[in-house]
Structure formats: structure tokens, C-alpha cells
Image (cartoon, rainbow, N blue to C red):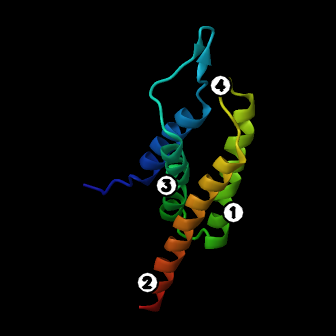
Amino acid sequence: IPKRDWSSDVCSSDLVLLSYLVFTPVTDESGPITFFTINPMMEKILNFFLLMPLPILLHFIWITLSGSMLVVIGPLTSALIEISQRWIPGRVSDWRDFLLNSSGAVVITLLLRRSRLKQSQR
């Protein structure tokens, strides 16, 4: 039985979840829709971790993708999310979210590069 490559399935699932979390309107005609409330500190922590799976998945899907491209992709993705949230009802575009999303993606990218360098030195 041939081995199944799950990377595209995991990437697709992550993109669907990410899209739902950041692009779903949070208001309707009767007012705000609240599924649950998050305190401000927890929101910051979640924003930091939001884009962390992206560089990991890209690293495993495109092994030849350079670390510098991964460093650029995280902030670009975060900027796209924050810019598009300006036009989604109930969503707020915030520069702090951009910084937290970007820094989480960059931290993971740097850790991936470090582990890749250690593996190449062996």
C-alpha cells in the first residue's frame, strides 16, 4: 500500500479553519454575534499563535522554499488578513494584531531555519 502524503490535507484544513476564524462576520441584523468571550490577554496570545502553522506547513510542503521567503510570507499573510478585515462586518483591523500574527510566524520560521541548519551540519 503506498504511503499517503497528508501535508496537503493538513494545509487545506488549516486554511479552512484560518479563513473561518478571520473572515467570518461577527454581526447580524440583531447585533453582535458572540460565540464566546475572550479576555484581552488571551486574545493577544491567540493572535501570536494564529499564523504559526503556516510556515510549518509551507516548510514541509515546499522543502526548497528558502527561510527568507518564509519570513516574508508570514507578515504578508497577516497584512492581507488585517486589510481585508476592514470590510468584514464586526471585524476590527488592528496593527497590534498584525504585529502579533507576524511575530508568531517569524519566530517559528527562525526555529525551523535553526533546526534545518543543525540537520545540515550533521
Indicate which label's residue lies in the foreground, 4 or 1: 4
Indicate which label's residue lies in the foreground, 4 or 3: 4
Q: Position of residue 30 (x, y in %)?
A: 59, 8
User: What residue did someone put label 1 on?
Assistant: 72
Mark-to-mark CA distance, 1 and 3 = 15 Å
Indicate which label's residue lies in the foreground, 2 or 1: 1
- The amino acid type found where label 3 is placed reads Pro
Q: Quadrant of the N terminus?
A: bottom left
Secondary structure at numbered mark 1:
helix
For the residue carrying disc 4, how many other residues have a C-alpha within 10 Å: few (<14), some (14-19), or many (20+)?
some
Mark closer to the chain start, 4 or 1 = 1
- Tag 2–tag 4 contact (CB < 8 Å): no
Residue, x 65% and y 25% (percent of image)?
A: 90
Mark number displayed over residue 90: 4
* For residue 42, above or below residue 87: below
Q: Residue furthest top?
A: 30
Secondary structure at numbered mark 3:
helix
